[in-house]
Image (spheres, rainbow, N blue to C red):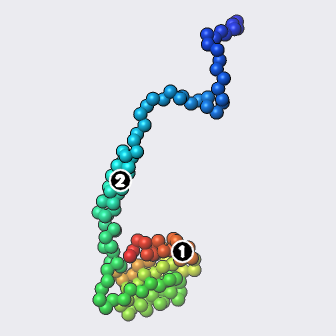
């Protein structure tokens, strides 16, 4: 194929390579700021409504209710040897118990054995979290269950 020299009808303009891909003649109308605020407010209201209607939002957990004469005890490390025996004694004495453990030394078998011995709802609760991490521990123990 023979090569022919190209001829241009226009002179080449020199542009900076940074701005070479941008079109400056864009005449589209940009969305207004008030519309964005209205959409954000509507989405926020919808999220609040959905969260309030969810079953876990209103504190309907058995562990969040206060009963006269029933003491709720938090046992850290309750899946270990000493903690599981302390939990067994508390449950035998009709306390309501929440075990918080990261299972680094304890085991889930001890918690399952306690759950089989005391199957009534609201007697025994297990939360898997590490209290050495203050942010995660506080969120997992108090953020969802108070």
User: In the image, what residue occupies the spot 42% across and 81% down?
Assistant: 98
The residue under label 2 is 41
Looking at the image, which is closer to me, 80 or 73?
73
Q: Is residue 82 above or below residue 140?
A: below
Q: Which label is found at residue 83?
A: none
Q: Is residue 114 visible?
A: no
Q: Position of residue 93 (x, y in %)?
A: 38, 93
- SS state under label 1: helix
- Residue 61: quarter of image: bottom left
Q: Which label is found at residue 134?
A: 1
In the visual, does 9 lie left or right of 89?
right
- Residue 141: quarter of image: bottom left
Q: Residues within 10 Å of mark 2 (few under 14, many from 20)?
A: few
In the visual, does 134 lie left or right of 48?
right
- Cα distance between the residues tagged 2 and 1: 33 Å
User: In the image, what residue occupies the spot 36% across and 89% down?
Assistant: 71
- SS state under label 2: helix
Q: Quadrant of the C terminus?
A: bottom left
User: In the image, what residue occupies the spot 33% across and 89% down?
Assistant: 70
Q: Position of residue 103 (x, y in %)?
A: 54, 76
Q: Quadrant of the N terminus?
A: top right
Whether the residues at callouts 2 and 1 have beta carbons within 8 Å, the answer is no
Looking at the image, which is closer to me, 122 or 22?
22
């Amino acid at each position: 194929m023979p090569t022919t020299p190209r001829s241009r009808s226009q002179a080449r303009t020199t542009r900076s390579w940074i701005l070479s891909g941008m079109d400056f003649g864009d005449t589209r109308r940009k969305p207004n700021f008030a519309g964005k605020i209205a959409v954000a407010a509507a989405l926020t209201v919808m999220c609040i409504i959905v969260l309030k209607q969810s079953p876990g939002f209103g504190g309907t957990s058995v562990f969040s209710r206060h009963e006269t004469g029933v003491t709720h005890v938090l046992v850290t490390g309750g899946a270990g040897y000493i903690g599981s025996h302390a939990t067994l004694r508390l449950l035998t004495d009709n306390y309501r118990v929440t075990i918080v453990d990261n299972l680094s030394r304890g085991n889930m078998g001890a918690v399952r054995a306690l759950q089989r011995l005391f199957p009534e709802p609201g007697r025994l609760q297990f939360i898997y979290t590490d209290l050495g991490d203050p942010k995660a521990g506080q969120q997992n123990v108090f953020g969802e269950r108070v």
